[in-house]
């Protein structure tokens, strides 16, 4: 799943090869940025809902090249880290925080917890992200803005038997408005918002549905056993 399997060449961006006209992307001091701050929202029928079940979030697994706090750009098989630009924390940590905010905003009846607080959780969610990058078109000009791409897989597991309940492939592409630091960071933020919204809605609904079906099956089994005894 790692980008290295695609034989990419990695280097720090020390010239204007991709972002030539954007002097604000270069410099000695590292500017720190974040993504995934969820705006307040309301979901019909969910206002004031209290958690009735919980899902344990396993640490998201990212390809090795984006596990840290550097911002990755790609053009074809060539990958470059932006010099002087970093995220305020490792990407998996920021993505986890963004997903938890989405759960609190969009699925307040389902509590998303970390592994350490998974006691009582009915399901576990594993997310594997292969691509988390700002991608430049091979035939694009030096000033053309990139497209932020987030791509991966998510699997929801039943913690009673550790079996997968359902899996989902997801892909989000968000064009940057400009070939600047602020334009690219904003595109990452929008892409993360879209991907975490999609993952939240899918996993929460799947957990609700599966919990209901499992409860019905359990109730049916009890009734059948009781009838058998009588």
Image: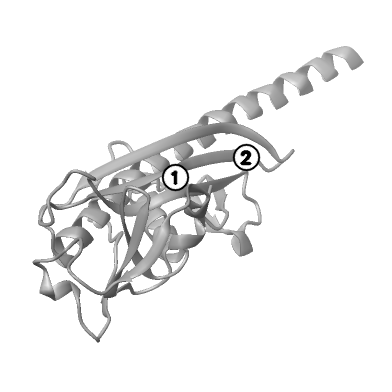
Q: Residue at x 61, y 32 (%)?
A: 165
First in sequence: mark 1 vs mark 2: 1
Q: Is residue 219 left or right of residue 68?
A: right
Q: Is residue 196 left or right of residue 224?
A: left
* Secondary element at image label 1: loop
Whether residue 230 is visible, yes or no, is no
Residue 170: percent from left, percent from top: 41, 37
Q: Nearer the viewer, mark 1 or mark 2?
A: 2
User: What residue does disc 1 label?
Assistant: 109
Q: Is residue 136 above or below residue 163?
A: below
Q: Is residue 67 left or right of residue 215?
A: left
Q: Residue at x 53, y 49 (%)?
A: 5
* Secondary element at image label 2: strand
Residue 146 vs residue 161, the one in the foreground:
146
Instruction: Give the total of numbered labels.
Output: 2
Residue 52: percent from left, percent from top: 52, 45
Residue 109: percent from left, percent from top: 44, 45
Query: Could you say which disc has been placed on residue 145 in the image?
Result: none
Q: Residues within 10 Å of mark 1 (few under 14, many from 20)?
A: many
Q: Is residue 96 above or below residue 171?
A: below
User: What residue does disc 2 label?
Assistant: 157
Q: Is residue 204 above or below residue 73?
A: above
The quadrant of the image that shows the C terminus is top right
Residue 87 vs residue 72, the one in the foreground:
72
Whether residue 145 is visible, yes or no, is yes
Whether tag 1 and tag 2 are in contact, CB under 8 A, the answer is no
Q: Residue at x 10, y 56 (%)?
A: 143
Most distant residue in the right direction: 229
Q: Is residue 147 above or below residue 67?
A: above
Q: Quadrant of residue 15?
A: bottom left
């Amino acid at each position: 799943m790692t980008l290295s399997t695609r034989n990419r060449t990695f280097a720090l961006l020390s010239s204007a090869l991709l972002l030539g006209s954007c002097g604000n992307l270069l410099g000695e001091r590292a500017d720190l940025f974040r993504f995934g701050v969820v705006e307040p929202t309301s979901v019909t029928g969910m206002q004031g809902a209290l958690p009735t079940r919980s899902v344990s979030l396993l640490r998201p697994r990212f390809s090795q090249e984006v596990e840290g706090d550097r911002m990755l750009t790609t053009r074809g098989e060539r990958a470059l880290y932006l010099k002087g630009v970093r995220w305020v924390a490792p990407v998996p940590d920021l993505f986890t925080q963004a997903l938890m905010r989405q759960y609190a905003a969009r699925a307040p009846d389902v509590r998303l917890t970390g592994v350490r607080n998974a006691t009582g959780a009915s399901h576990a969610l594993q997310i594997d992200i292969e691509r988390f990058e700002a991608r430049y078109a091979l035939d694009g000009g030096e000033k053309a803005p990139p497209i932020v791409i987030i791509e991966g897989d998510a699997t929801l597991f039943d913690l009673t038997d550790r079996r997968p309940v359902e899996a989902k492939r997801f892909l989000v592409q968000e064009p940057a408005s400009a070939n600047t630091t602020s334009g690219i960071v904003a595109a990452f933020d929008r892409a993360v918002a879209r991907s975490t919204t999609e993952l939240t809605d899918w996993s929460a609904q799947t957990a609700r549905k599966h919990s209901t079906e499992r409860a019905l099956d359990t109730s049916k089994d009890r009734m059948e056993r009781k009838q058998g005894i009588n």
